[in-house]
Image (tube, coloured by chain):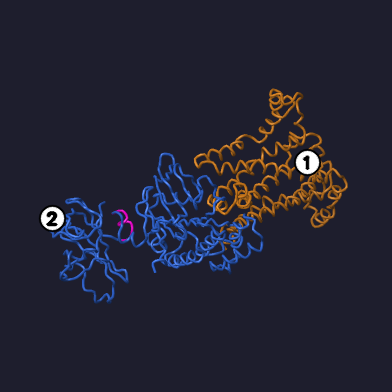
Amino acid sequence: MRRFLLIAVPYFWLLALFLVPFVIVFKISLSDIALAIPPYTPTLDFSAGWAGVRAFFSALDFENFTWLTQDDLYWKAYLSSLWIALISTAITLAVGYPIAYAMARAPEEWRPTLMMLVILPFWTSFLIRVYAWMGILSQEGFLNQFLMWLGIINEPLTILNTNTAVYIGIVYTYLPFMILPIYAALDRLDESLIEAAEDLGCSRLSAFWLVTVPLSRNGIAAGSFLVFIPALGEFVIPSLLGGSGTLMIGKVLWEEFFSNRDWPVASAVAIILLAILVIPIVLFQRNQQKQAEAEQ
Amino acid sequence: MQSTVFTPWEDPDAKPLIRFQNVTKRFGTFTAIDDLSLDIYEREFFALLGPSGCGKTTMMRMLGGFETPTEGRIELAGKDIVGVPPNKRAVNMMFQSYALFPHLSVWDNIAFGLRRDGKPKAEIEARVAEMLKLTRLEKFAGRKPHQISGGQRQRVALARSLAKAPKLLLLDEPLGALDAKLRQDTQFELMDIQEKTGTTFVIVTHDQEEAMTVASRVAVMDEGRLIQVATPDRIYESPANVYVADFIGDVNIIEGRATPGEDDTYAIDWAEGEVPLQATSATRFDKGQTCYLAIRPEKVTISTDRPEGAVNAVQGKVLDIAYLGNLSTYHVELPSGMVIKAQTANTRRISRRSFTWEDPVWLSWTVTGGVLLAG
C-alpha cells in the first residue's frame, strides 16, 4: 500500500500537469471555430444529461487536421522548422564541443569559474538577451559598425530579419545546453585512456577521434537533443530576429492563436508538433537510459 | 655452465637496451629525478622499487615518452629517444588503471595498436588470436571491459601492450589492483610471459616482495636517486646501506663502533658492558668508526641455553611472538631495552613450542650472518 502511494504521487502530477492539458488541447483541435467565449464549439453541457454528452461527441471531427494537409503553409512550416532546428543543432555542436573540451582540459581551479561563465547568461531574462541581439545585428548595429570600422565591408550587412539571425539567436540561446552535458562526459574521461591510445600508435588527432569522441558520444547526444527539441518549436527567436521569410511552426501557431483567434486549428498544429517531437524525445530517453546502464 | 646464467650486466661488452645518462627531471622547483644514470639490458625483467614519490613512475613515464627529461639523455637501442612522441616509440606501456577503452570489446582493445600500424586484416586477426591464447582470454574476446573481472582486465591490458611486440614493455604497478592470492599467481604468469616473448620488461612497484619475485634486477630508489641496483638476492643479502636493508624485508639494525681485527673481521662495541659482536665485512672500517650491523631475523637462532661455540650471543626475554603459520617471529628484549627479532620455521606443532612469553632466551648468529654497513 505504501509502495502504491509512493508511486501514485508522481503519476498524479504527470496526470494533472501533462495528460489533462493534453486532453483539453486535443479536444479543442477536434472542435469548430465559433464567435464566442471560449472561441470554439461544442462545449460539454452536463445539464442536458446523457443526450448532451452524445451531442458533444458527435460534434467533434478531424476537420482541422484535414485542413492542415490541404494548406501547404503548414507542412512547409513543419519542414522548415525541422531544417532550422537541425542546422542550429549542428552549429551549436560545432561551437559547443571545443568550448566543453577546453573547459574539461582547463586547470582544476579554473573549472568552477568557467562553468559559472557558461551559466551566467541565464541570470538575465531570455527576452532581454534576444532584444540585445537585435541591437547587435541591425543595420546600424554594433556588428555592422565594427566591421565597417575595420574596413572589411563598405555597406552594412543585412543580418537582422533573416534566417542567419535566427541561427545566431538559437545557437547563442541554447549553447549552454550543449556545453554542459558534453563537458560532463569529457570531465569523466580518464586521461590515461588518451595516453594509452598514443602509446599504441595514435597521433594526438587520431586519439581524439578514436577515443575522446566515442567516449563523449552520450554527452553529444544529450546536448543535441536538448538543443533540437526546444529549437523545433521555437517562437520568440524567429519572431524577433527572423524576417517575413522565416517560416517556423512556433510562429504559425502563435499567429493562429492570437491573430486569427482560430483555437481549433492552432490546437491541431500543436498536436502535430507534439507528435513530431515525441520521436526525438523517445530517442533522448533511450540514450539517457543506455548511459545509465553503461555506468553501472 | 656459466654461460646459461642470464647476467648481461656483468658482461662489459654487452650493449644496454636502455641507457639513462645523467638524467634530471624537475617539476617546477621539485626535483623528481636527480642526475641519474642507469643501464637496462635486453630480455631483462627490471624492477624500479621505492616508496611513493621516489621518482620511479617519472622514470617510467620518461621511457614511455609522456615526460621529457629536463637534462640528460635517454637511449633506446643506442638511439636518443628524448623528444620522440609516445606513438613513435617501440615501447608500450601497461597502465596502472589498465586504461582499457570502455567502448571497445576485448578483441578490439587488443587489436587497437595493430590497426594503427595499418597491418593487413589477416595478420591482425592472427596476432590478436595469439595474444588471446597467451593470456588465456579466448572466451572473453567479445566482451566489453566492464563485463569481465579485475584479473581478466589486467590480462587484457597486458595482451594489448604486448600485441605490437614492443622492444620494451613498461608495467606501472601492474598487480596493484588485484587481491593477494591472484597477485601471486599473476606474478608467475608475468614471468612466464616475459620468458616466452623475450620482451624486456620494466616494472614499477612499491611492493618489495613483488619486485623480488619477478625481477632479474631491482633498482631501489629514494628521492629521485638510485640507492642500489642489483639482483634480488644481492639486494637482500648485501644491501648497500641501512635504507635498502630496512626497505627490503625485515631487519635488525644494531649501531656500534668498529674495531678492525684479522681477516676482514671487525669487533663491534654496541652496548656498555656487553661482549663486542663479531662480523666480517669486505668494506673497510676505521677504528672507532660508527657502523650498523644489519641482521635478518631468519639468520638469528633462538635457544634456551647459550649455544656452544657461538661467536655472537646475547641474552634477553621473549616480549612478543608473531605467529604466521609457517613461521614464528620472536621479539626478544635485551637488558638494554633493545628489541631483536628472530624468526624460526614452525617445524613442530605450536603446542610443542619451546618458548613462550617472558621466557629468558639466547639469541645467536654467525660471523657472516649480519652485514656491516656504514650508514
How far apart, in angstroms, are the residues tagged by discs 2 and 1? 100 Å
Q: Amino acid at mark 1?
A: Met
Position in image of residue B79 (x %, y %): 51, 49
Residue A248 badge: 1
Residue topped by disc 2: B272
Label 1 neighbour load within 10 Å: few <14, some 14-19, many 20+: many
| Callout 1: chain | A
Element carrying mark 2: loop
Position in image of residue A236 (x %, y %): 72, 37
Q: Which residues are magenta?
A: B242-249
Q: Judge by depth and name the residue closer to the eye, B298 or A276.
A: B298
Q: Is residue A217 above or below residue A256?
A: below
Q: Amino acid at mark 2?
A: Glu
Q: Quadrant of residue B143?
A: bottom right
Residue at image point 31% right, 68% down:
B324
In the image, residue B245 lies in the stretch drawn in magenta: yes
Colour in which the image shows chain B: blue
